[in-house]
Image (cartoon, grey):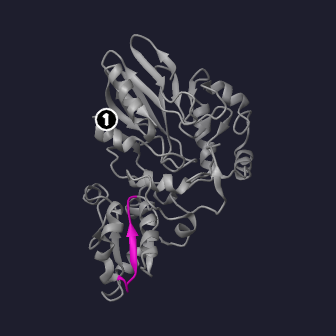
Amino acid sequence: MATTTSNENHLLLELNGGEACKTYLIADRQRRKAALLDPLKQNIPKYLGVLAYHQLQLEYIFDSHSHADHFTAGFELAMLTEGKLAMHENAPAPKVKVHVRDGDVLRVGDIEVKVMHTPGHTPDSIALYLPRLGHLYSGDTLMIGGTGRTDFAGGDPGQSYDSIQRMFALPEDTVLWPGHDYRGNVSSTIGHEKRTNPRAGGGKTRDEYIHIMNNLGLPLPQKIMEALQCNVSASNDTAMKFPTIAELNEIRQLEPKLVRQLLAESDDKRPVVVDVRQPDEVDGELGHIPGSITLPLSELTKRYQELEQYKGRNIICVCRAGVRSTTAAALLTGLGFPNIHNMRGGMLAWNQKESATAWSLKQDDRKEKGEGNY
């Protein structure tokens, strides 16, 4: 466990030690309030022990984005503690209690935590900036001597460059704590990365950065699609058989505008809409498509027989952002349903939310053997 900052008022720790994935504790010692950033599923007992040892109450559990290289502990920690899971509003996952936007300010005791939306690695990427303490938790966007790769689902090198430039605009003595490090580094500063980062520093232009990121040729992490699908579905079953990249790529993606047109057809031609969100999401702020059938992804393989009567019709799967529903569509296809489609962008796109259509589970067929986000 590596201490980042510790005094009588504040406790800022990195909790995973030598692991490549980093988890950070942000705590106000006087008020005994704490937040965790990017906790790992396998380290839950350690995190609970640290909280108990320091007599801290967990206020927030932040996931900096939808992870594709490991299983998040966010959902289980939210059940085991009073902590509220917080992610960007573009996050596809259910059970997120606080959807944040760029510029939102949350408080952990007396610590001001400012949210920066930093798309590029994923559409829902965020960084946490502590202005009074001069710390930036950059997630997987800006690394020490590197940057987060942009070839994952929804990645965009141009957006990544723009996000990093916003970070480079912070005070140069801002301490940088990345979401990953594979080289034994602990921290850096904005000024150092701005001058020396081989991908984004040294005054590189947007076009130069995009060229670099588009030509990295990195292998995909092991089990990338299993981890991503598990995390965005809030599944506790890490052994669940999720669809492969090839199976996901076969699903036909329909734009919300086309779905609206199809739903206006006569009864015998109208498609069946299957909403694979949790019931509380269906009744939540994004609403639902009238006449849709609610069948949560977590129950799909147990209850798919309920859809047998619609097997001869077109079925359109829907979720929050179009990610879970792509998984559901691939599962239903594998279960023998011949006419399965997905609504791209989910209910975020249906409601015309900003950046709603950025998510996609399509990947190329590179061998899944590598490690690392940069």
Name the residue carrying label 1.
83
Measuring from the top left, give residue 274's x and y in whole percent.
34, 71
Measuring from the top left, give residue 122's x and y in whole percent.
54, 49
| Majority SS type along the magenta span | loop
Determine the image quadrant of residue 335: bottom left
Measuring from the top left, give residue 312's x and y in whole percent.
38, 86
Query: Which residue is painted at 50% across and 23% down in the image?
Result: 1
Query: Which residue is painted at 57% across and 23% down in the image?
Result: 174
Residue 140 visible (yes or no): yes
The reply to whether the magenta stretch includes residue 33 is: no
**Magenta stretch, residue numbers:** 311-320
Residue 78 position (above or below residue 34): below
Which secondary structure lies at badge 1? loop
- Residue placed most toward the observer, 112 or 373: 373
Judge left or right: residue 372 versus residue 357.
right
Residue 249 position (above or below residue 143): below
Judge left or right: residue 371 versus residue 94.
right
- Three-letter residue code for mark 1: Gly
The reply to whether the magenta stretch includes residue 313 is: yes
Query: Which residue is painted at 44% across and 43% down in the image?
Result: 72
Residue 131 visible (yes or no): no
Judge left or right: residue 370 versus residue 333.
right
